[in-house]
Image (cartoon, rainbow, N blue to C red):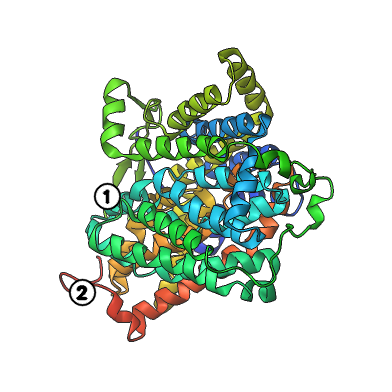
Amino acid sequence: MIWSQIYDPFGNMVLSTIAAAIPVLVLLGAIGIFEIRAHVAAMLGLIAALAVAIIGFGMPVGLAGMSAVYGAAFGLMPIGWIILNVIFLYQLTNEKGEFDVLRHSIRNISDDRRMQLLFIAFSFGAFFEGAAGFGTPVAVTAAMLMGLGFSPLSAAGLSLIANTAPVAYGALGTPVIALSAVTGLDLMELSAMIGRQLPFFSVIVPFWLIWAFVGFRRMIEVWPALLVAGASFAIPQYLVSNFHGPWLVDIVAALSSMACLAGFLRIWRPKNPITEAPRDWSSDDVKDEARNGKDEAAAGRSVLKAWMPWIILSVFVFLWGVPQIKVLLDGIFSAKIPVAGLDGLVQKVPPVAPEPHAEAAIFNFNILSMTGTGILLSAVVSGLMLGYSPAGLLRMYGRTFWMIRFSLITIACMLALGYVTRYSGLDATMGLAFANTGWLYPFFGTLLGWLGVAVTGSDTASNVLFGGLQKVTAQQLNLNPVLMAAANSSGGVMGKMIDAQSIVVASTATKWYGHEGSILRFVFFHSVALAALVGCLIMAQAYVHPFTEMVPEMAAPITPAQ
C-alpha cells in the first residue's frame, strides 16, 4: 500500500517545521555542543529521525525502518568504501616514510605553509572533487596536510573550507546532471547559470581559506598568489560550464589552477614566509612531523617515488569517473536491487512535487565502477611499488579497517538519518518553510540548498530533494526557475563543510577521532557566512541590474503554478 507524505501533520507549519528539524538539531547539538562521539551522536540523530517520522509524521514503521537500511547501505557503499581505501593508501605511504619525501618536494614549490595549503587543499583538492566527489577530496587533502605537519584541526577544518566552490560540478558534473533530471530544466542552461554564480566564490575562497588559517594580516601578505590560484580556477570554471557543459569543469579548472600557481611561485616568493604551521590549541598532543629531523634523509630519496602513489591515485580516480569506463565496468557486473518494503511505496505530493509520484528505492551495487574500487586498485599498485608483499598489504588493510571502524558506523548512521528524513518528508517540510518567504525567497531558497547538503552530505542529494520545489516555488513567485534551481546547487556547496558525513571523513583522515565537535565549531561560521554571501548574489541576480543580465531569458512566460 502506497503511503503519501504529509508536510504539515500538526496543522501548523511552525510546529511541523520545528518537529522536522529535531533530528538535525539532535545530531549537530550532540556533536558540536555536547561533544558526544560521532558514532553515538549519529545513532541518537537516527533514533530521533525515526521517532519523528513515525510518531509525528505518520510514516509506517516498516517504511521508516527500510529507509534507514537503504541509507546505511548507501553510506557504506560507495562513501565508506572510498574512505576506507583512501586511508589504506595513506597508511601504505606513511608506513614507508614517503610522506617525508612528499613534504620536502612540496617545499620545493614553496616552503610557505600558506602556499602549501593553497596548492593542496584548494587546487589539488578540486581535481579530486571533479573526478570523484563523495568525500574523496577531503580524505586525500586532509591526510596530505597531516603528513606535512599541519595540526589535525587545521588539516581537517581547512580541507573542508577549501572543498566548496568545486562541489557543484563534482564527480564529472553529477549534481548538475541530477538537477536537470529532476526539474526538467535544460542541462546547459543550468550548467551556465551555476557557472555565473560560483566563479565569484572561486576567487573569494582562496582568500577566505588563508584568512581562516593565519588571519587577515598574514593573508594580505600573499594576495598575489591567492588571486592567481582563484582567478586561474574561476575563469576556466566559467568558460567550460557555459560553453562546454558540466562534465569537465572542475578537472580543467583544477589543472589550470595547479599549473598557474606552481608557475607563479617560481617567480614570486612571500616576503615574510611562514615555514611552520601555526600551533592551535588542539595540536599539543600532535607531533609536528616537520620537526622530526627527517628532511635530510627525505631529500636523498626519490621524489618521483613519493609522488607516484598520488599520481597513480589521480589517474585511477579520473579513469573511474569517465562515463564510458563506468558503463564498461557496469557491463561486467552491476546489480540494481529494489529495496523491498520501500521501493515505490512512498509518494511525494504537491506542493513539493508538481504532481503525485512514487519515490524509487533501488540500491545500485555497482562495486566495480565505484570510485572506491579504483582507489583500492591504485593503493594495491602503489603498495607493490613501495615494496609491500601481498600478505603485507592484507595486514595493512585489516589494520586500516579496524582503525576506522567507528567512522564507518558513523557514516552508515548519518546516511540512514538522511534517508529517513527524505522518505518521511521531514526535509520537504523544512523546505516549505523557506518557500514561504515571499520576495526574499532568492536568499532563503539559496539557504535551502545549503540546508539540503548539510543534512544529506551531498549536493547531488540536495538537488534531487529540493530541485523540484525550487522550480515550483520560482514559478509561483514569477522568478526564473533556472536561477533558483542553480541557486540550490550553488548555495548547497557551502553546506558541504558542515555536513556530518564530511566532518567524519575529515576526522578519519586526520586520525582525530572523537573531536568532530571541534571541527564542526571551527567551520560552522565560515559555512553560514559564505552561504549568506551566495544568497546575496542570488538576490542581486534576481532583482538588481546589471546582475539580472546574467540570468538567461525564460523560454516562455511563467505563470503561477495551479
Label 1–label 2 contact, CB within 8 A:
no
Q: Is residue 390 left or right of residue 256?
A: right
What x and y, as percent, mark residue 115? 60, 61
What is the residue that sits farthest to the bottom in this orientation? Answer: 545
Which one is in front, 170 or 525? 170
Is disc 2 placed on a helix, strand or loop? loop
What x and y, as percent, mark residue 503? 62, 48
Three-letter code, disc 2: Glu
- Identify which residue is drawn at 59% across, 30% down: 88
Three-letter code, disc 1: Ala
On screen, residue 359 above or below 525: above
On screen, residue 121 above or below 543: above
What x and y, as percent, mark residue 277? 73, 57
> Which label sits on residue 222?
none
Q: Quadrant of the C terminus?
A: bottom left
> Which label sits on residue 181?
1
> Which label sits on residue 553?
2
3D distance between C-alphas at marks 1 and 2: 20 Å
Q: Is residue 90 left or right of residue 430?
A: right
Question: Mark 1, residues whose alpha carbon is within 10 Å: few (<14), some, or many (≥20)?
Answer: some
Residue 92 found in image quarter: top right
Marks counted in the figure total 2
Q: Is residue 478 left or right of residue 22?
A: left
What x and y, as percent, mark residue 521? 69, 58
Which one is in front, 382 or 70? 382
Q: Is residue 56 left or right of residue 471?
A: right
- Identify which residue is drawn at 67% across, 43% down: 147
Q: Quadrant of the N terminus?
A: top left
On screen, residue 25 above or below 53: below
Is disc 1 placed on a helix, strand or loop? helix
